[in-house]
Image (tube, grey):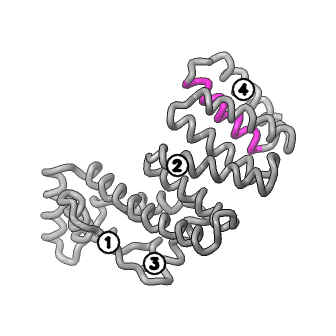
Amino acid sequence: SPWEDPIPLTRSWCLWELFCTIETKTQFGIAMNEKSMEMLLQDIDDNASDVIAKIKSTIDCEKSESSNPLDNMQIKNAIQRTVGFTVFNKKINDRMKEWILAKYSQEYERRLIGLGADHPQTTEAMENLATLYVLRGNYDKAEPLTKSCLEKRKAVFGDNHPNTLASMDSLAALYAKQGKYEDAEKLYLETVDLYKSAYGGSDENTLHTCNDLASVYMKMGKFDLAEVIYKESLATRLQ
């Protein structure tokens, strides 16, 4: 079935068997035809975060079904007696993230070899792979990819291009997730200045990055600086 409508992930037996492969550390794989795989990779190119969100919203063992109602009841009873629905869903979701990450890593390597490191599609794949690592919580693996992507964007587009600024914003956000607040602060300040210079203080991207900077200040305990930014952003939006 199409990846965005994965019927097996709505069936209680399939979810239970997948859970068992996780618990027993058994090899796991997904059979997908070529067209569906192409659609999945294209959708990751379009928006990797949306793909992960779609998978997460699909996995809900409490709503899963079975052709045999007794089987369905017994499986759900077994889940409740062991890990519970919340943990069960998280384990399945995490395993699916790992599978998607592995498949897209292969796609990145394919572009790297076939198109070259400097090809736009390779840079796009690098950025998407970094996003998938972030969503998986693998920040250390995401960081070198995000930095490399930013370097390539600067070389191709220059400092003020939207693609470059988006990459700067992504790296600053990653620093914040890692707890590298001083690095995040420095890069957010630079990004805000570039956004203001190129697009003005009322631009939505400028305001969004300002709020991200204020959030970092909150985590650093610099509440006075955060307050100033939040008030300025609110005043701009109210104009």
* Real-space CA distance between mark 2 and mark 1, rounded to the nearest whole angstrom: 24 Å
* Real-space CA distance between mark 3 and mark 1, rounded to the nearest whole angstrom: 16 Å
**Mark 4 crowd level (few <14, some 14–19, many ≥20, 10 Å Cα):** many
Residue at (59, 67) in percent of width and height = 112
Helix, strand, or loop for circle 3?
Answer: loop
Q: Depth-wise, is mark 2 or mark 3 nearer the camera?
A: 2
Q: Please report contact status of discs 4 and 1: CB closer than 8 Å, yes or no.
A: no
Q: Nearer the viewer, residue 152 or 216?
A: 152
**Residue found at the very far top of the displayed protein:** 224
Q: Please report contact status of discs 3 and 1: CB closer than 8 Å, yes or no.
A: no
Helix, strand, or loop for circle 2?
Answer: helix
Badge number at residue 229: 4
**Place of residue 156 in the rendered image (x, y in percent of width and height, measured from the top left):** 78, 57
Badge number at residue 142: 2
* Real-space CA distance between mark 2 and mark 3, rounded to the nearest whole angstrom: 28 Å
The stretch drawn in magenta includes residue 20: no
- Return the residue at label 3: 2
* Real-space CA distance between mark 2 and mark 4, rounded to the nearest whole angstrom: 29 Å
Q: In the image, what residue type sits under mark 3? A: Pro
Residue at (66, 68) in percent of width and height = 121
Q: Earlier in the sequence, mark 2 or mark 1?
A: 1
Q: In the image, what residue type sits under mark 2? A: Ala
**Mark 3 crowd level (few <14, some 14–19, many ≥20, 10 Å Cα):** few
Q: Quadrant of residue 212?
A: top right
- Return the residue at label 1: 29
Q: Earlier in the sequence, mark 2 or mark 4?
A: 2
Q: In the image, what residue type sits under mark 1? A: Gly
Q: Depth-wise, is mark 3 or mark 1 nearer the camera?
A: 1
Residues rendered magenta in the picture: 204-219
Q: Left of 158 or right of it: where is 20?
A: left
Q: Quadrant of residue 98?
A: bottom left
